Amino acid sequence: MAGAATAGAALYATTNLLGDEEATAASGPLDGVSQPSTTKLTPFKDALRIPPTLRPKRDGTTEIPMVERALRLHSQMPPTPLWTYDGHFPGPTIEVERGRRTRIAWANRLRGTHPVKAVWALPAGAAPGLEPLNNPGSQGAIGRPEVDDLVAYTSVHLHGGHQHATSDGAPDSGVTYGGSQLSEYPNDLAGAHLFYHDHAMPVTALNVLSGLMGHYIVRDEAEERLDLPRGAYEIPLALADVNFDTDSAGRLDGRILAKRVSLGKPVPGELPTAVAYFGPYTMVNGVVWPYLSVQARAYRLRIVNSALSRAYRLVVVDEETGKAVPNAMKLIGTDLGLLGKPQVIEEALTLNPGERADVVVDFAAFAGKRLKLVNTVPGAPVGAPVPPANIPFPDVMQFRVARHAKSPYKAPATLSRDFKRLTTADTPEAAVERFVVVAFDKSRTMPQMWEMQETDGSAKQGDGVVQVKLAGRTKTLRRVGTAFEDTTTFFGSSGAWEKWTFLSLTPAGGPPIVHPMHIHLMNFQVVDRRSIDAAGMDFALGGTTKPLELGAALPVAPEESGWKDTFALATNTAVTVLGRYGSLSGRFMYHCHILDHEDEGMMRPLVIMPPSVLTLHHMMQSMNMGGTNMAGMDMGGGHTHH
C-alpha cells in the first residue's frame, strides 16, 4: 500500500485482503464524484478502507508528518479537506512489539486554517438540546469566526499508553506549523489495541473531527501463541459520527460540519452553553457506511469508538430477516488487552468514546449472507432510526459473506493466564482513595467535574461540600478544583495502586449524559457501579443538604469486565475503579472523553512521581502550609485505604 516516505526508513506494510475474490477492502483513495451531486448517501456503496500498517524503525526516530489532504469519505461526495497523519485517514496503523522502545517525531506541517466548518444551531420545538438537530447543512446556523481563523495547534496523545508525561501529548503544550513533538513510547504493556489522537486543548474535538486519529497495536509473544485470527483476518475498525455541509441546493459538498446546538443565542466573542457534537452519518475507518467482503471464516475485529460524543450500542443484524443475530460476537479483550476467557455478547456491544473492544466473529455460520452492524438504544426496534437519541441513520457497516464456508472456529478456552477479575476486596491496604464528582453549575446547564478531598466532616453543608454514605460511613467531601487551570491537588506514586470513586449527579429533568471517564497512565478495572439518589443535592447551593444514598449494585457489562483506561459514568450513578499506575512519571490528565466536554474544562491534572520524590514533595507542601500534619494524606484529595 502506498504511503508517504517517513524519515528514518520506517516500514509501511499492508494487510492484504485481495487474495480471495470474495474478500475485498479499499487499499487506496475512493473513486467518485468531484462536484456535489446528491442530498442522500447510499449505505454500503463503498468498501471499507484499511489504513496502511507502519512499523517504526528499531533505532533512531521515525517522523510522522501531519499534512493537509483531500480524501473522499463516500463516493457520492466530493473529496473532503482533512488534516491527516501522513496523508491517511485514519492515520497509519502503528504496530510495535511489547517492550521495544519507539521514538516518533510528530511533525506539524499544517500550513492553512482549520478544514472543519463550525456553526451554532439554535434549538427549536421540544426541550432545548434534545432535538435531533444533526441534519446536514449549515443553512440558518450561526457561523463561528473564531474557528474559521484557527491555525494548526497539535498535541498527540497515545491513548492507553504508558509513557513519560513529556511524551503524553499535554493539552497545553501544542505544537504549531514547522515544529515537532518528540515522543518516546516504551510499549511496556501486554498486547493491546491503543489509539493515537490529537489532545490539544481547547481544540481537541475540532482537530480529531478534522482527521487526526489512528490505530496503535502492541504485539506480545503470549498473544501471538494463541490461535486467534491474524493477518488478513484481523481488522482494526475506528467508529465515528460525522456531519457535512451542503450547497445552496441541499447537496452534500463533502466538507465536515461541526454543528452544535446552542442553548441560547450566541453573543459575539462569547461561547454559549451548547450540546455536545452529534453527526447523522457513521464512518468506519474514514468511510461512511462501508461494506467489507469477508470469507466465511473467523475474523478478529479490533474496534475503537473514536467519536467526539456518540456512544455505539452495536448489534449484528441479518439483512434478509431484519432481525438481530444473537451471540454473533465473542469478546476476547477490552481496552488494555485480553480477558481471561472469551465472553459471548448475547445481543449488543456498547462502546463509549475512547473505549475499545476486541471481538471475534465467525462468519462460517453465515455463508452467503449479508450482515450489518447497527447502532441502537435499549428498548428501540433494532435497525430502526431513533431520533430522540440523535440516531437518524442506525447503519454502521455491512459484511458480505462468501458462499463457501470454512470449518467453524473454536476460540481458545484460556486467553490470558495472568488475568484476574478484581473486586473491591482486592484493594491493597496502602491504596490511595480518591473522589470525583460530575455535576452541573448553579444554572444546571453546564456539566462540571469537581475534584474532591475528604474532610473531617465538620462542614456539612455549603458550596462545594458533598456528603455521601459509602460502606456504612458518611464521607464529607470538599471541592478543591473544577477548572483545568485550578491548582493541582492530585499527586500520586509511580506504580502505586489507587481506588477512585466517581459520583455523577444530575438534577431532576436534566439531560441523561453518559460521561466516558479516562485516566492517563492507569490500568484499572470497574469494581463497583451503583445508582445514586440525588435528591440530597442542591444544585443552586452547589452541595448536598443531606447525605447521598447509594442503591443496589448495578451490573458490569462483559465489555467493561477487563483491564480498562476509560469507563462509562451514567447519570446518577457511582462507579468505583481499582487500578495501578505505570512506572513512569510527570504531569498527566484525567478527563471526560466527550471531547467537547474535555475542551470546555472537564479535565484535571494528575501528577505522578517516584515514591521517594513524592515523600519529599509532601514534606515541602507541609512546610509551606505552616507545618500542617499531612500524615495519611496523599495531598491529592485522597486518603490511604483502610
Image: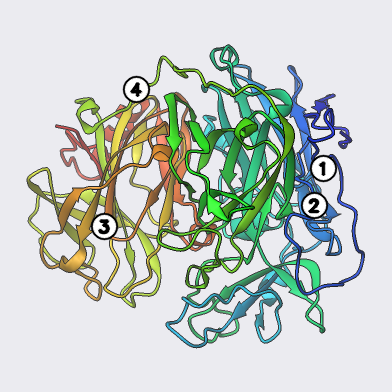
Q: Which residue is mark 1?
A: 26
Sooner in the amino-acid sequence: mark 2 or mark 1: 1
**Three-letter code for the amino acid on which mark 1 is drawn:** Ala
Residue drawn at the location 71% of the way across and 77% of the way down: 137
Sooner in the amino-acid sequence: mark 3 or mark 2: 2
Tell me the element at label 3. strand
Where does the C terminus fall, quadrant-wise?
Answer: top left
Is residue 401 among the parts visible in the rendering? yes
Residues under labels 2 and 1: Cα distance?
8 Å
Tell me the element at label 1. loop
- Residue 324 versus residue 523 in the image, above or below: below
Q: Which residue is mark 3?
A: 479
Find out whether the residues at labels 2 and 1 contact each other: C-beta distance under 8 Å: yes
Of circles 1 and 3, which is in front?
1
Is residue 104 among the parts visible in the rendering? no
Sooner in the amino-acid sequence: mark 1 or mark 3: 1
Q: Which residue is mark 2?
A: 46
Q: Residues within 10 Å of mark 4 (few under 14, many from 20)?
A: few
**Residue 243: % across, % down:** 68, 67
Residue drawn at the location 86% of the way across and 51% of the way down: 30
Of circles 3 and 4, which is in front?
4
- Residue 392 versus residue 54 in the image, above or below: below
**Three-letter code for the amino acid on which mark 4 is drawn:** Lys
Which label sits on residue 420? 4
Foreground residue, 342 or 347?
347
Residue drawn at the location 68% of the way across and 26% of the way down: 95
**Residue 325: % across, % down:** 52, 45
Sooner in the amino-acid sequence: mark 3 or mark 4: 4
Quarter of the image holding residue 377?
Answer: bottom left
Residues under labels 2 and 4: Cα distance?
42 Å
